[in-house]
Image (cartoon, helix red, strand yellow):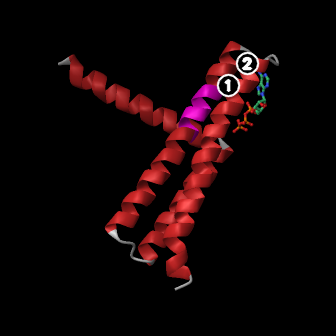
């Protein structure tokens, strides 16, 4: 009897985490806006199934990494709000992961959309 409720609560907790990150993080809002723009373009250009799949995977990677980056920022702030080289390294490395994914996503987007824009 309890198990379905626990699973449902975990889902709600995860959803609350996503909502909190979107509300509190400007970068998360930017990534979601970019994803919305890209998905709109995908509908407009009638992308192939393969192109849709690549696009959705890339969007999921960027948004998920931004969520993990936000979680790491919160965890670091919980441990210390004082300046600490390890705190800096943790936040910078997590931000670096988002940057790598975002740059690759930009390149993937260009490879997919440029042939539609410049035939
Ligand atoms: N406790 C700390 N010790 C040392 N450097 C820190 C510390 N907290 C933050 N920094 C440095 O400041 C940068 C910005 O940190 P901050 O917590 O403001 O995150 P952010 O990347 O600006 O994210 P956001 O603005 O989305 O919250 C970090 O990337 C890091 O270089």
Locate residue 115, reporting x and y percent.
51, 78
The quarter of the rendered structure image containing the N terminus is: top left
Q: CA distance from mark 2 to mark 1?
A: 6 Å
The answer to which quarter of the image holds residue 5 is top left
Q: Residue at x 52, y 58 (%)?
A: 35
CB contact under 8 Å: marks 2 and 1: yes
Packing grade of label 2 (10 A; few <14, some 14-19, many >=20) is few
Q: Is residue 50 left or right of residue 59?
A: left
Locate residue 48, reporting x and y percent.
35, 71
| Camera-nearest residue between 32 and 106 | 106
Vertical side of 43 occupied by 12: above or below: above
The answer to which quarter of the image holds residue 106 is bottom right
Residue annotated with mark 2: 86
Q: In the rendered image, is residue 24 in sight?
A: no
- The majority secondary structure of the magenta stretch comes to helix
Respond yes or no on whether mark 2 lies under 8 Å from ligand 1: no
Locate residue 68, reporting x and y percent.
55, 33
Range of magenta residues = 66-73
Locate residue 25, reporting x and y percent.
65, 41
Q: Residue at x 50, y 33 (%)?
A: 17
Vertical side of 11 occupied by 40: above or below: below
Residue annotated with mark 1: 90
Secondary structure under the numbered disc 2 in the rendered image = helix
| Camera-nearest residue between 71 and 18 | 71
């Amino acid at each position: 009897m309890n198990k379905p409720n626990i699973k449902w609560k975990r889902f709600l907790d995860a959803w609350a985490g996503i909502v909190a990150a979107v509300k509190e993080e400007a970068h998360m809002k930017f990534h979601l806006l970019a994803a919305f723009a890209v998905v709109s373009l995908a509908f407009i250009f009638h992308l192939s199934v393969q192109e849709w799949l690549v696009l959705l995977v890339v969007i999921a990677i960027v948004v998920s990494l931004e969520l993990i980056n936000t979680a790491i920022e919160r965890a670091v702030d919980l441990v210390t709000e004082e300046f600490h080289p390890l705190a800096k390294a943790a936040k910078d490395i997590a931000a670096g992961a988002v940057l790598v994914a975002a740059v690759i996503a930009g390149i993937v987007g260009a490879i997919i959309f440029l042939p539609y824009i410049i035939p």
